[in-house]
Image (cartoon, rainbow, N blue to C red):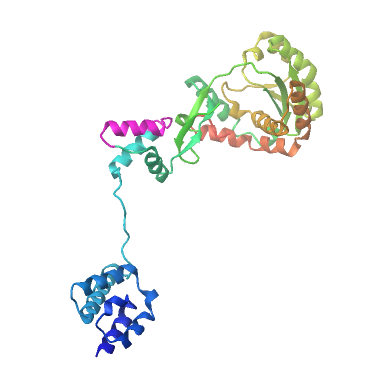
């Protein structure tokens, strides 16, 4: 009879510790030990507790079998339910409030939110705040610096995008673009880098150890000129005299070429406008505070990346490296920048005149 009871126990729950079967015939114990590894620790502990309380082997078997069946009926599995662990410090409402505050002001640091929560009587760590934000797809990223756009800037950008947005790529291939040459963190989601609240407004300013003037078109890069000191209107006219026409010939723009420049004050003086008019240079207007509408910014960024990799140590070496790397830029790269220009104008409309991802 004892052998029958032990067999039934094995068939239901597997093997158990030897001390459970104290008092049973010794020849029945090895049968239980043959499947010892199949028994969960929690099940074995339950068996021991029931045995110590005086329950018979048959009663233990029926009790455990009933528990497993009930678990299966209610949850559809014999696996134990998930243990949630320690209760969350922040309630769902607290988490929603935290996320809303971050979305309203993405520039606040995690430690500032910790202090705000402490003022309401909730003590949390910085890591807890970060984990909550991570769960809502808000991650700390470096804020992009964008030109400060006033209302008149936005209206000018929209007028420019509307006036030229429908022009074919062949028009932009004849445009010659020119230009001269710090970390904040915000909490944001992916593809939200260009929203005004996630950017750092900037204004135009001069200065720097080395100042370069350059131009490019769909056919490649034009001249690259080093400016000594601060560029004034007289210097700018001299640069145009020296490099504009030669670059137009090099890039094969012909009489259809159009010159695009920004609204830097020195570019709009009468002496500059007169020279452009006397030399019959077609100038394409350009809205202020809109470097994202001038692809040469991408060319400067590419040049800067290449030169930085060369680790220059002197200003003369820096200028030489810029000249060498400019010559290495393939015309295909420049052509691709020009080809997507209509997309830039479309984004101006879609982004409600705010800065675009370009």
**In the rendered view, does 94 fall on the left or right side of 271?**
left
Residue 18 visible in rendering: yes
Q: Nearer the viewer, residue 211 or 265?
A: 211
Is 221 inside the magenta-drawn segment? no
Q: Which residue occupies 75% across, 19% down?
A: 226
Where residue 251 appears, as percent x and y from the top left, is 78, 30
Report which quarter residue 58 is drawn in.
bottom left
Q: Main secondary structure of the magenta part?
A: helix
Relative to 71, say whether 309 is above or below: above
Question: Where does the N terminus fall, quadrant-wise?
Answer: bottom left
Q: Residue 240 at what x, y percent from top left? A: 75, 17
Q: Is residue 35 left or right of residue 60?
A: right
Q: Magenta part of the protein: which range?
A: 103-122
Q: Nearer the viewer, residue 86 or 184?
A: 86
- Asked which quadrant contains residue 43, the reply is bottom left
Q: Is residue 121 left or right of residue 186?
A: left
């Amino acid at each position: 009879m004892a052998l029958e009871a032990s067999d039934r126990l094995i068939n239901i729950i597997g093997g158990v510790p030897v001390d459970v079967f104290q008092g049973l015939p010794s020849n029945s114990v090895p049968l239980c030990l043959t499947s010892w590894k199949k028994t969960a620790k929690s099940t074995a502990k339950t068996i021991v507790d029931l045995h110590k309380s005086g329950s018979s082997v048959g009663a233990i078997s029926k009790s455990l079998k009933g528990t497993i069946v009930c678990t299966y009926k209610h949850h559809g599995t014999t696996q134990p339910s998930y243990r949630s662990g320690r209760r969350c410090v922040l309630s769902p409402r607290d988490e929603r409030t935290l996320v809303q505050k971050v979305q309203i002001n993405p520039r606040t640091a995690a430690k500032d939110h910790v202090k705000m929560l402490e003022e309401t009587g909730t003590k949390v760590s910085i890591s807890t705040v970060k984990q909550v934000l991570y769960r809502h797809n808000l991650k700390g990223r470096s804020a992009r610096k964008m030109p400060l756009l006033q209302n008149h800037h936005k209206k000018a950008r929209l007028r420019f995008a509307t006036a030229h947005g429908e022009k074919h790529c062949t028009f932009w291939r004849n445009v010659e673009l020119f230009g001269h040459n710090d970390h904040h963190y915000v909490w944001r989601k992916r593809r939200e880098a260009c929203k005004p609240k996630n950017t750092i407004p900037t204004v135009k300013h001069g200065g720097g150890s080395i100042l370069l003037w350059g131009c490019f078109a769909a056919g490649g890069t034009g001249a690259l000129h080093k400016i000594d000191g601060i560029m004034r209107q007289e210097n700018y006219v001299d640069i145009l005299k020296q490099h504009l026409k030669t670059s137009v010939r090099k890039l094969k723009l012909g009489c259809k070429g159009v010159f695009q420049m920004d609204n830097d004050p020195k570019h709009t003086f009468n002496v500059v406008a007169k020279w452009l008019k006397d030399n019959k240079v077609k100038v394409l207007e350009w809205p202020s505070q809109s470097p994202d509408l001038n692809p040469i910014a991408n060319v400067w960024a590419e040049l800067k990346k290449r030169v930085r990799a060369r680790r220059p140590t002197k200003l003369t070496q820096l200028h030489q490296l810029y000249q060498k790397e400019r010559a290495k830029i393939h015309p295909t790269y420049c052509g691709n920048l020009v080809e997507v220009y209509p997309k830039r104008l479309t984004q101006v409309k879609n982004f409600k005149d705010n800065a675009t991802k370009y």
